[in-house]
Image (cartoon, helix red, strand yellow):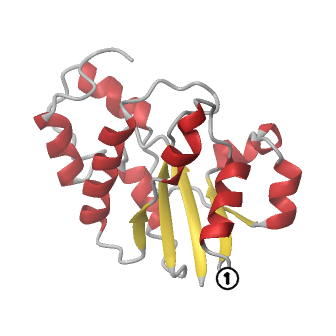
Amino acid sequence: MKIAVFGSAFNPPTRGHLSTLARLTHFDQVLLVPSFSHAWGKSMLPFATRCELVSCFIEDAKLTNLSLCTLEQTLGQSGDAVTTYALFSALELQYPDAELTFVLGPDNLLNFSKFYQSEAILKRWSILCSPETLTVRSTQVREAILAGQDDLSPWLTPSVAAMVKAMALYLHQD
């Protein structure tokens, strides 16, 4: 079994994320892993809320190989940030017969040497750099919402946009 692991803050999940995921159909499964506690201290909505957004996003995406993975929540209970190395070590135990591939964007590839145990990651697991074909940053979306933008469809899938509006998410500065 070939499993791609796509981690992100998903704060919120965007059409940019979707443009990358749509190119991963050759994997049996693609795990979407919301950050529980960001390694570089990003401010994010509560984990449970972002997981709900990811569930809506998966429903909208209509890609049968996508699934939500909340393993970081278990790994992050100590209060420390969850590293990619720790996540993959745990996933390897959960899926002992799978070929795991770490999917990252060009921005993270440029900073890969800063990842904890980056050399060990390269030796143990596959890495795939997959830039999005539609550049949409979650920061852009949050700024647009703060600025009063009502139509979120250029950036968000329908169910994610509906949840953001219904729950009045991102209406306050992070």
Q: Position of residue 58 (x, y in %)?
A: 32, 62
Residue drawn at x 28%, y 48% as measured from the top left: 52
Residue drawn at x 75%, y 39% as measured from the top left: 111
Residue drawn at x 14%, y 44% as measured from the top left: 162
Horizontal side, residue 111 vs residue 41: left or right: right
Say above or below: 34 vs 125. Answer: above
> Circle 1 sits on which residue?
97
Residue drawn at x 54%, y 51% as measured from the top left: 7
Towards the viewer: 39 or 145: 39
Neighbor class of circle 1 (other Cα within 10 Å; few <14, some 14-19, many 20+) is few
Q: Position of residue 51 (x, y in %)?
A: 35, 48
Q: Position of residue 129 (x, y in %)?
A: 67, 59
Towards the viewer: 25 or 119: 119
Horizontal side, residue 134 vs residue 151: left or right: right
Say above or below: 59 vs 151. Answer: below
Q: Secondary structure at mark 1?
A: loop
Say above or below: 19 vs 48. Answer: below
Horizontal side, residue 10 vs residue 54: left or right: right
Residue type at mark 1 is Asp
Outermost residue to the front = 78
Horizontal side, residue 51 vs residue 165: left or right: right
What is the tally of numbered marks visible in this picture? 1
Q: Position of residue 18 (x, y in %)?
A: 40, 59
Towards the viewer: 141 or 58: 58
Q: Quadrant of residue 169?
A: top left
